[in-house]
Amino acid sequence: METKLYIKKVCTITSKGLVVDGQKLMINDQNSFVEFAKKIYKKYEINYPKFFKMDNLSKLAFLASEIVLREEIKKEQENNIAIVFANQSASLDTDVKHQESIADKENYFPSPAVFVYTLPNICIGEVSIKHKLNSENAFFVFDQFQPSFIYTYTKQLLDLGKADKVLCGWVELFQENYKAVVYLVDKKNTGTVHQIDNIKQIFN
């Protein structure tokens, strides 16, 4: 008999606002992602100064993950939570900024603080560092969201005992176009079955 997996918590952050488990908790009345990100950070009383040094993709992934994991992480024990993220633009938002800093040979000032974020999986690293996760992780780049792939990959991780839970997400950001849909998959029955149709529903 096939083991069922369940979606435990869902966080969506877009230019329209913040939605958690289907409830709109914040309307985005800010002019930029950076300002809206600060507003979410303050609302959840997150105390993590390194957040302000992150690139925008990492900020987006970090905030959505923080909201999903805040009641899930047990500080006194190891948390075997894998992370599987994907997007369309990879780290293009930061890549463009890095390219601008090296384009002019007469004003060649590449920033190490920017360069370090020119890989999209760095956002997974930021989440892992915050929550001391040493578990499996992967970042994929697709032309569009692939629910069937995410479903299969997540199921394999849990079936093979590679993780106890999996944090899944689509974290797309380029300039002021952004969308994060992050959710936790658990073996415990939390109501919503982790299946392709339900993944499509929470993404849309």
Image (cartoon, rainbow, N blue to C red):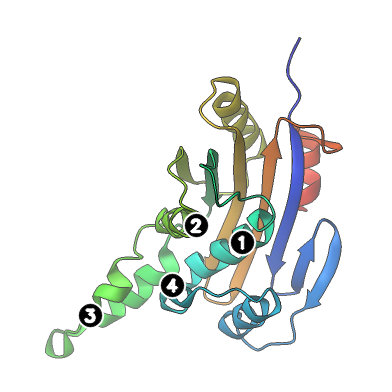
Q: Is residue 115 left or right of residue 202?
A: left
Badge 3 density bin: few <14, some 14–19, many ≥20, Cα 10 Å: few
- Please report contact status of discs 2 and 3: CB closer than 8 Å, yes or no: no
CA separation in Å, label 1 and label 3: 36 Å
Residue type at numbered disc 2: Val
CA separation in Å, label 4 and label 1: 16 Å
* Residue at (39, 70) in percent of width and height: 94
* Residue at (69, 69) in percent of width and height: 14
Badge 4 density bin: few <14, some 14–19, many ≥20, Cα 10 Å: many
Of tags 4 and 1, which is closer to the observer? Answer: 1
For label 1, the residue is 66
* Residue at (35, 68) in percent of width and height: 95
Badge 2 density bin: few <14, some 14–19, many ≥20, Cα 10 Å: many
Whichever of callouts 1 and 3 sits on the residue coming sooner in the sequence is: 1
Instruction: Report the front residue among 16 and 54.
Output: 54
CA separation in Å, label 1 and label 2: 8 Å
For label 2, the residue is 127
For label 4, the residue is 55
Q: Is mark 4 on a helix, strand or loop?
A: loop
For label 3, the residue is 103
Of tags 1 and 3, which is closer to the observer? Answer: 1
Q: Is residue 203 something one can see in this rendering?
A: no
Q: What element carries label 1?
A: helix
Residue type at numbered disc 1: Glu
Whichever of callouts 1 and 2 sits on the residue coming sooner in the sequence is: 1
